Amino acid sequence: MKKLIDTAVLRRLFAYTKPYKKTVLGVSLLTIILAVLSPVVPVLFQQAIDKPVFHGDVTTLSYYMMAILGIITLQAVLQYTYSYYSNALGQSVIRDMRKHLFEHLTYLNVKYFDNTPIGTLITRVISDLETIADVFEAGLLMIISDLLKLTVILGIMFYSSWQLTLIAMSVLPFLLLAGWFFKEGTKKSFQEVRTQVAQLNTFLQEHVTGMYVVQIFNREQEEYERFREINTKHQNAHIRSVFYYSVFFPVVEIISAIAIGLIIWYGSKEIVKEHFTFGLIVAFVMYVGQLFQPIRNLADRFNTLQMGIVSGQRIFDVLETQQTTQNIGNVTFTGLQDSVEFKEVWFAYKNEDWVLKGISFKVKKGETIALVGSTGAGKSSVINLLNRFYDIQKGDILIDGHSIKEYELHSLRNKMSLVLQDVFLYSDTIFENIRLYDTSITLEQVIQTTKSIGIHDFIMNLPGGYNYNVQERGATLSTGQRQLISFARAMVRNPEILILDEATASIDTESEQLIQQAIEKMMHNRTCFMIAHRLSTIQHAHHILVLEKGQIIEQGTHESLLEKQGKYYHLNALQYKNAL
Ligand SMILES: Nc1ncnc2c1ncn2[C@@H]1O[C@H](COP(=O)(O)OP(=O)(O)OP(=O)(O)O)[C@@H](O)[C@H]1O
Ligand SMILES: [Mg+2]
């Protein structure tokens, strides 16, 4: 059987309140005080009516009234303080959890992100955490506070008159039944709302990113229809959840009116018999109001708590994901001394779908090795292994004779720079995109780098130069321009090993020439792994590997491979023909 409340998750959530012990203590204290204070006003009313009002004692009555006013004011102030601090507590907790979650995400490996939709992670970091804030603001503490209030009021009621209490409680089964229907109904509809919100998010995110696809293929009308459908579903889900509220609350009102009616009916008969006082009946009418409010809220709060626990579970699942790149090596990589060697490397992204099948080659310090081959041959996969984006299944990759796993991961990555096929830019200035918020890198250093690879003038020609804001993912730049910026990003760290995954060959433009020259300058006196689609780029490489379906089918220098008249020769002839 499923547990009503998963206390393990709840305990873990509450572990996050540890730094805020004082707030928790204060809020708990206020909960108790507020609960104890709740029957005071009815009791005072009861006494005021039974004593001064009955005896026409105006002076004493005014004391009572002042006391009542004082208590109500005190309650309002305490209530305010309670809300403020419980909300502050909720927000502090989710701020900490969010930090923790993001930090954890930054340690997960590429494989995890390959298999996790962006939308899911955004939902975890944003909306799931909001639900958890609710647990602290309207969930657990409020439930405790409501239960306390109920106990105190019921205690006072029994103490004052057990007959009237039993009468008030005679409607309780109906109330509980209504509460149960409400709880089940809203729970379902809330889940539905959240599913619809997620769908709306995903749809919007994908369509804003890929709006040009919509427009170029004239899909506006169809996509609009699809959006309308999702939007309507979202609306309906919300309306269904509102429905339960709009039925439940009036039902509670009716039930409580019936309870009050019963009390007055029975009570007035007893007043006539002088068993009860008038004040007692007034107090009981007030108690009923106070009793039903927490009962009404409980159903709602219970949902809040359960939803928070579901979200908590999801977040803890992410936090428990141990898909990190194992970093247990203790050799610090200070720089390449001799060579990098692939020894019978077998690699698959999934199970045994081998993408690389027994790759072996060796690169000496300072040499350039180039990888060519048709699309999907496994070129990018080879270089993804070097900085351990993925770990291999069989064989070994040796750097200066040590397996790459023996190196401390950060020291290894520190000395390698990678230029990927798709350049990712942040919506910030060119300067920040080059130094990646590393404040130890100054503008002078950046300029020195860009000058050394011949792209300083290109950057200066952009509006604002290094302060040019590239906006959303560099949308305002051409592919070639983005590639140039990523070169600067790679070179400013003065890498020992440069890994370059060239973007697909495109026509000769000004930036193409710049790219060509920059690459030549970058390769100079450096160990380089190059994937080139333009074979002209790699003519001077020391060693060229031709990959086909995860295997090396040819290798050698440009000249020797041409002589061989094999695959490389054909690729070359094809490009040469196209260039004409
Ligand atoms: N992240 C991934 N998860 C699963 N399979 C992948 C992943 N990346 C690539 N593959 C698969 O691995 C194979 C080799 O891909 P790879 O990216 O290495 O090719 P490539 O030679 O770089 O091609 P291109 O010239 O188009 O860049 C392909 O069949 C591809 O489907
Ligand atoms: Mg590739």
Image: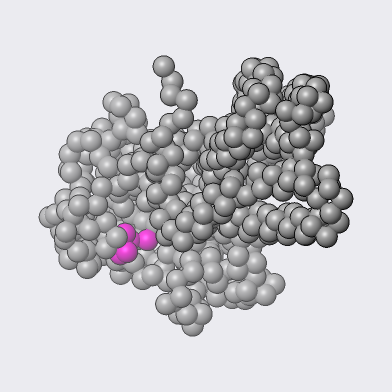
Tell which of 366 and 410 is nearer to you.
410
Tell which of 74 and 214 is nearer to you.
74
Q: Residue at coordinates 38% horizontally, 46% vertically from top-left?
A: 108
Q: Is residue 438 above or below residue 61?
A: below
Residue lying farthest to the left in this orientation: 401
Tell which of 301 and 404 is nearer to you.
301
| Scheme of image coloration | one colour
Q: How many marks?
A: 0
Q: Is residue 252 above or below residue 78?
A: above
Q: Is residue 198 left or right of residue 534?
A: right
Tell which of 279 and 376 is nearer to you.
279
Q: Is residue 392 left or right of residue 462?
A: left
Q: Quadrant of residue 291?
A: top right
Which stretch is magenta? 413-417
Residue 550, image x, y percentages: 32, 34
Residue 441, image x, y percentages: 44, 76
Q: Quadrant of residue 161?
A: top right
- Is-magenta flag for residue 423? no
Q: Residue at coordinates 53% horizontally, 32% vertically from top-left?
A: 306
Q: Is residue 137 above or below residue 446?
A: above
Residue 121, image x, y percentages: 51, 42
The reply to whether residue 250 is visible in this rendering is no
**Which quadrant is home to the N terminus?**
top left
Q: Is residue 260 above or below residue 369?
A: above
Residue 455, image x, y percentages: 53, 71
Q: Residue at coordinates 60% horizontally, 65% vertically from top-left?
A: 428
